[in-house]
Amino acid sequence: MTKITWLGQAGLLFEFDGLTVMVDPYLSDSLKSLNPEGCRRVPVDEAFFDIKPDVLVFTHDHIDHYDPETVKRFITADSGITVLSPRSVWEKVRLFGGNNNYVCFNRHSSWTEKKVIFTAVKAEHSDPYAIGVVMDTGKYRYYVTGDTLYNEDIFSDLPRDIYALFLPVNGVGNNMNAFDAERFACRVSPQKAVPIHIGLLDNKTADIFNYENKVVPQIYKEIKL
C-alpha cells in the first residue's frame, strides 16, 4: 500500500511499504527573503519535520526544490539518509556530511532502495542538470517530472505504463503551462495525472489543467489515486 501526500509547491511524500521518500520538500519561507512576491500562502506544517525519510530526492537547484533551510531539518550527522540529486544539487548537499549517502543522480542513472527502483530522466529547465524521477515499485510506476517544459527528448527516457504522473502546470519559470501540461499528460498517458507547483506561491488552482483522469491534490493531505 502506497500513501502519497502533497507537501505544497512540488514537494511530495511517498510512503511505500517499508520505505519513506520525500521529493523536493519546500517547508520554509526562504523565497520571501529573495523576492517578497515569493511568500508562502499556506503556513509550514511543522509536523512533517517529525518524519525521518529513508530517501530524499532533489530534482534541481532552485530554492523551492532544494532548500537548505528545509534540508537541515532532515539531514543530520546521524540521519543515514540516501540523497539522490543531480550534480548541481549534489555539489552542495553533500557538504552536510554525516553518515548520509549522497548519490550523484544524473539523467539515466538508476538507484535501488528496498526494491524500489529510482531512475533519473530528462527535464528541460533552466538548471541544465535538472531531472525528473521515475519510481518503480514492481507493481506501479510513479513519475515526478520536476520542473520542466514540454520537450520531445523526455519521452524516450520514460518507461511504458506510468501509473501516476506529477507535473507542473503553472507556466512560469520555465515550467509547462496548463495547455502544454495537458499535451504532456496525453503523451505519457498515465492512469492518473496530478497537477502540482500551484497554490503555494501563487493563486492558481488545478482547474486550469484538463486531463480526463486528473486527481486534484490538497496541500498536506493524502492524494487519493
Image (spheres, rainbow, N blue to C red):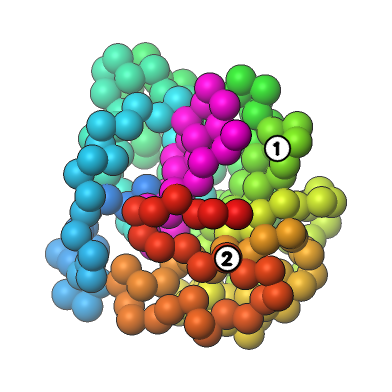
Q: Which residue has dot 1 on it?
A: 136
Distance CA(mark 2)–CA(mark 1): 20 Å
Up the image or down, 176 lies above or below 89; here it is: below
How many discs appear?
Answer: 2
Residue at the image position 23 percent from the left and 40 percent from the top: 47
Q: Can you give x and y, in whole percent of width and height, for residue 210 in the image?
A: 63, 81
Q: Start and end of the magenta stretch?
A: 1-24
Q: Which residue is mark 2?
A: 215
**Residue 125: % across, % down:** 55, 65
Is disc 1 surrounded by few (<14), some (14 to 19) or many (20+) residues within 10 Å? some
Residue 10, by quadrant, is bottom left
Q: Which mark is in front, 2 or 1?
A: 2
- SS class, disc 2: loop
Q: Earlier in the sequence, mark 2 or mark 1?
A: 1
Task: Give the residue type at disc 2.
Answer: Val
Q: Position of residue 12 (x, y in %)?
A: 45, 49
Residue 209: x and y, percent?
57, 80
Describe residue 220's horizontal placement relative to residue 54 as left or right. left
